[in-house]
Amino acid sequence: MSATPRLSQVYSPNSSKGQNSPTETQLGESVQPSASSIPPLLGASLSELTQWVQQQEQPAYRGRQLHDWIYQKGARSLSEISVFPKQWREALVDVPIGRSILHYRSEAPDGTVKYLLRLADGHIIETVGIPTDKRLTVCVSSQVGCPMACDFCATGKGGFIRNLARHEIVDQVLTVQEGFGQRVSNIVFMGMGEPLLNLDAVIGAVKSLNQDLGIGMRSLTISTVGIPNRIRQLAQHQLQVTLAVSLHASNQTVREQLIPSARRYPLEALLDDCREYVQLTGRRVTFEYILLAELNDLPEHAVELARHLRGFQSHVNLIPYNPISEVDYQRPSPRRIQAFVDALEKQHIAVSVRRSRGLEKDAACGQLRASRSTQTHQL
Ligand code: SAH
């Protein structure tokens, strides 16, 4: 039996490009760097885990046991895996599974639960569990912070720290599943970060969530503000996930006002790439459209939007703006929202309005983290 597990020879987890490894968190807590350089196991497939246990001179069936303990039983340390021989477990004590630590939890009256999770390097991310009749949807983060700096977004106001690794994405889903004691049915990449700037880790996580946690590809949604060339790259993986594109405007001028990166990715080019996504994958695209009073919610905006989307296999999801403290956009009244819906429907555009969940407190993307990570309140 070899004393040092050689996981890195079996698979290489997604490196977190552009990441820094602070030893101080934003809370001012001092954090020990990970004792081990062995990459975390979470996110690894059954065959990767089986190869790894065999490298440890263990029989192949231990791979299945390890998979079961990590993904079904929620083991946080290999030392918990009581079916493993004692001596081997002791040798594995430094091998990280890659689970986060619950930093803060807040439950809204509608049952929506927001979690702040502390990562191994001390950074805090936000994850949301949203229960509906039969479903449990998890809103996951793909980055710590976000570099896109969209003007209406709390995460964007806080800047970018680093990409998440595959295991850090999978962990969020396991955490919500364990918290609710219910299987997760749907996942939306609508938490902190821009998933297409962290495509390798996001795709690795999507595959793991599908194969290791059994979540259907069609129940996964990747939401993007649009990054040149990346929609095509995603399409080439043929994952059958839903692509949601944060359009938010019916013309280039308003879009640039809200989304700085739109200057380098004209609306027409973005829409062409979305059309290509539909062709390559056979999946329709969802367009997200944040409604900001007076700015993009007039009936003529609806007509302009409909003109762009005519003949396009798509669906428009309207998101009434959740106010954030940094800017003074206004959420439109229910009457204005309905007028926008009516104007789109008149143009034969498939449309829905996103119901705000847990709006009572810190509801908008990144707001909870912004208000809580400066405090030391912990569970
Ligand atoms: N970067 C990705 C995913 C994260 S944001 C993207 O842009 O799509 C997920 C969704 O929440 C996006 O549609 C985003 O525009 C929206 N959003 C961000 N801040 C919001 C706010 N204050 N009110 C309503 N929607 C918001």
Image: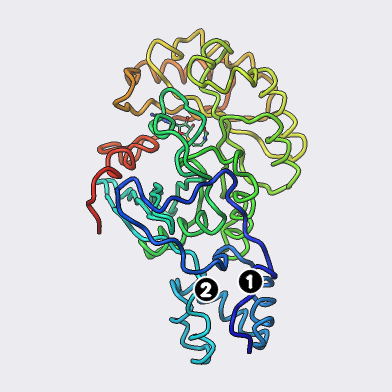
Horizontally, is 29 left or right of 88 in the view? Answer: left
Q: Secondary structure at mark 2?
A: loop
Q: What is the CA distance from the residue labelled 2 to the residue labelled 1? A: 9 Å
Q: Where does the image place residue 353, in percent across and percent down from the top left?
A: 44, 30
Where 65 falls versus 150 (above or below)? below
Mark 1 closeness class: few <14, some 14–19, many ≥20 residues within 10 Å: many
Amino acid, disc 2: Val
Q: Give the image location of residue 186, x and y in percent.
A: 51, 51
- Amino acid at dot 1: Leu
Q: Residue at x 66, y 24 (%)?
A: 270
Whether residue 334 sits left or right of residue 38 in the image: it is left
Tally of numbered discs: 2
Question: Could you tell me which residue is drawn at 45 percent across and 39 percent down?
Answer: 145
Judged left or right of residue 374, residue 307 is: right
How far across and down, in percent of the image, does residue 11 sit? Answer: 68, 65
Residue 95 is marked as: 2
The answer to whether 73 is drawn above or below residue 340 in the figure is below
**227 vs 192: above or below:** above
Q: Nearer the viewer, residue 278 or 196?
A: 196
Whether residue 170 appears in this view of the structure is yes
> Can residue 132 be spotted in the picture?
no
Whether disc 1's CB lies below 8 Å from ligand 1 is answered no
Q: Earlier in the sequence, mark 2 or mark 1?
A: 1
Which quadrant is home to the C terminus? bottom left
Q: Is mark 2 in CB contact (under 8 Å) with mark 1?
A: yes
Note whether ligand 1 is within 8 Å of mark 2.
no
Q: Nearer the viewer, residue 22 or 301?
A: 22
Residue under circle 1? 7
Q: Residue at x 66, y 19 (%)?
A: 310
Q: Is 180 located above or below residue 332 in the figure?
A: below
* Nearer to me, 74 or 213: 74
